[in-house]
Image (cartoon, rainbow, N blue to C red):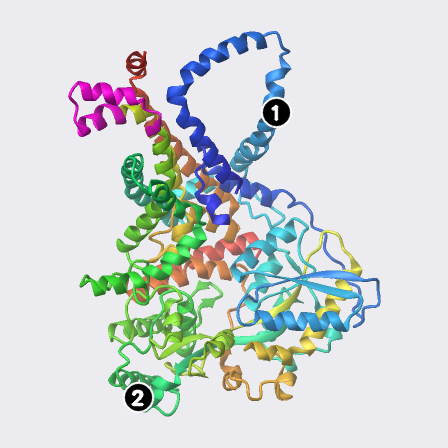
Amino acid sequence: MKQKDFLGRRAITATALGAAFMLVLAGCSAGETGQTVSAPFTGEYTGPEVELSYWNGFTGGDGPFMETMVSEFNAEHDNIKVVSNTMQWVDFYQRLPAAVTAGEGPDVGVMHLDQLATNAARNVIVPIDDLAEELGLTSDDFTEEVWDAGVYKDARYGIPLDVHSLAMYYNTEHFAAAGITEAPTDAASFQDALDKLQAAGFETPFWMPTRWPSHLMNLSLLWQNGGEPYGDDGATFDSAAGVEALEWQRSMVDDGYSPSDVAIDSQYVAFKNGETSITWDGIWQINDLAQSGLPYAVAPIPTIGETDAVWANSHNFFLPRQSTADQNKVDASKVFIAWMSEQSAEWAGSGMIPARQSVRDAGALEGLPQEVIAGTIDSMRFLPPIPGIGGVQAETLEIAVADGVQGATTPSEALKKAADSATQLMDDNKASFGG
Amino acid sequence: MSTKVGERALPAGRARRPSASQPESQKNRGVRAGNRQQGIATPWLFLAPYLLLFGSFVVLPAVLGVWISLHSWDYTLPNKPFVGLDNYAALFSPGSTVSGPFWGSMRATAIFTVLSVPLLLIVPLAVALLMSKKFPGRDFLRAIYFAPYVLGVAVISVLWRYLLDNNIGLVNHYLGLLGLPDDTAWTTTTPAAWVALVGVTVWWTLGFNAVIYLAGLQDIPVELYEAARVDGAGPWMQFLHVTIPGLRPILSFITIITLLASANMFGQSYLMTQGGPGRETRTAIYQIADTGLRNFQMGSAAAMSYVLTVFLMAISAFVFYIFREKQPRKLEKEVRS
């Protein structure tokens, strides 16, 4: 109903001032800068009973798993009660800074790896180096990129729970009908599969989305082509590697493998309905697809470019800044994070890949659909820890990819314009975040 | 929800005014004379609750908004440097990162307003005229026409997003069955997206305007129609010379609120088209919310709000001017007495 207020038939005075009003609310208590001073973490919590508010964005097939794990934690810990508050990630990143700034933030939470730097720079989350040390977590147990991305200005802000990447889903019935026995792994076999599917009567076997997750496909392909989306001097996703990536995406439409102007989510709905044979989406969709009863299989995305690479992200635990430090809550939160990290094998049931090598080696993924994806963990690529990068990307690359796939502008033109604008925005961010 | 209650209460009160105001004001004159003996504070005390709300939720934010718009204001950062008119200057300098998207969104708002307002003035009037006739099932039909307005914007937008989907939606499917073109991308290409957004909005809100028209129609004295008939006026002449003048005060009210509501469109494009294709259906409010609340550039967002406000005030003033000018109040009174 919230949006309704935006549309409300207001008197003129209230018209555009609604926005201003929200700004005021947000600005009200921006003054406090009380930083939590962490005492050394002891690994146990023996203090009085505390209730922890735990924020996360697990609204998909991963949600029920998180709820079960939270209940288990509560059952095992008499003096800690974790109450989770689950919301859409989009709202999460909007609300968290507002809540923390107003002194109403949660006690503990989970966010994406590529948001850690942004929120660290905004002073929304606090360093947790001591926790990492106490848990005995070192880079050895993690993929280097995941581990390093949790560091901003020499301090660690996140404890990785999982990694999740883009994957290729395909309809096994369609594949069987087309006589394809193995999941395609490169440009040639992918092309071959598409042609065979078309020959078997599946007219549009690979719907190319214009919105989410189209820019993730673009990033994956850019990395495969040897490019980097962001450099030291700004955005570089308009490089030849990026343009080639977007041209390939557009070619799926031009060559008739995909209908044009695919609206948001409809490629996924079409896949679930058996209207299309292949779709690239996140591995977090595994449970949703399993429940739908669709005959599907999952495989790593094929290497269209020269090297194996796929976009990935990671869920990280963090501690928010508190206006009034309650050491008991901080300690209890750390116990919670430590427990969750150790139990991350169970989290694999949500479709994610546990971030810890030791947990994976212990067989957490055995027999799970994402096992094949976990094999490619070394080719997973993450966005660099640049503060404000998420907002920049949403305003530039995502729109350029949409324009390019729709054919409104040529790929090179769309990316060039967006990259120029992204570089400007990154410069602005540098200035406001202090480098 | 509070705004919505206010929205509904307002038109009912206004709608009654044209015909009922005269006797009421005469009645009031006696009462007011008695009031004069009361203390000076009395009216203020009566006004206090509203003034408090008005002050803290309209005046104060408005003033603070100006202050914010003069800063590079990210509420999560400790320093919010004063930048003077830079935020406004950036909006008006073509090369900046904000001006392109902002003026694009203003253009989108203008397109939506120009397309939707005439429809939202005419279609509900036609519906109201129909619904004011006596026929079996009239109340049921009135309810049907009003029903969509009860739904939230999230409900209607998600509903229509799937119905209108160019590849998996029902609308194109049925158009195909009828032998019409079935490949229109209603939510991902323009101008089809505008047709979809305007169509859905008209479907959604026409009931509201129709109810106000209906109230207005019922306030037109039956004698006027009788008199017109005696003078030999047909249905069209009656509509032109009795109904339209009778509705004029209401027409100005409906025009203003419809204009403002259309200029404030956000939810439909946010949920149905995600502002796409590209940024083409991203409206001004959408852009402001995105800039301020998602990208934390409150200063720039506040500046955009004020530019939009200035536009809306100018347009509202223009509409008031037009209706004032043509309003033959005196004539109406003469006819009535």
Question: Magenta span covers which residues?
Answer: B217-243
Residue A132, compared with residue B117, is above or below; it is: below
Give the class, few, some or many, for how many residues have Cα within 10 Å of label 2's Cα (few <14, many ≥20).
some
Along the line of sight, which residue is nearer the eye, A397 or A161?
A161
* Three-letter residue code for mark 1: Ala
One can see residue A352 in this view: yes
Between the C-alphas of marks 1 and 2, the distance is: 76 Å
Instruction: Output the chain of dot 2.
Output: A
Q: Which numbered marker is on residue B286?
A: none
Asked if residue A88 is among those painted magenta in the image, a careful observer would answer no
Along the line of sight, which residue is nearer the eye, A11 or A144?
A11
One can see residue B69 in this view: no
Residue B61, by quadrant, is top right
Q: Position of residue A233 (x, y in %)?
A: 47, 63
Residue A304, by quadrant, is bottom left
The residue at which mark 1 appears reads as B48
Q: Secondary structure at mark 1?
A: helix
Left or right, A419 with respect to A328, comes to left
- Considering the whole magenta stretch, tell me its main secondary structure: helix
Q: Position of residue A258 (x, y in %)?
A: 29, 73
Residue B273, compared with residue B109, is above or below; it is: below
Q: Residue at x 45, y 46 (%)?
A: B288
Residue A190, compared with residue B333, is above or below; it is: below
Instruction: Output the chain of dot 1.
Output: B
Q: Position of residue B63 (x, y in %)?
A: 54, 32
The residue at which mark 2 appears reads as A178
Q: Are marks 1 and 2 on the same chain?
A: no
Residue B330, compared with residue A360, is above or below; it is: above
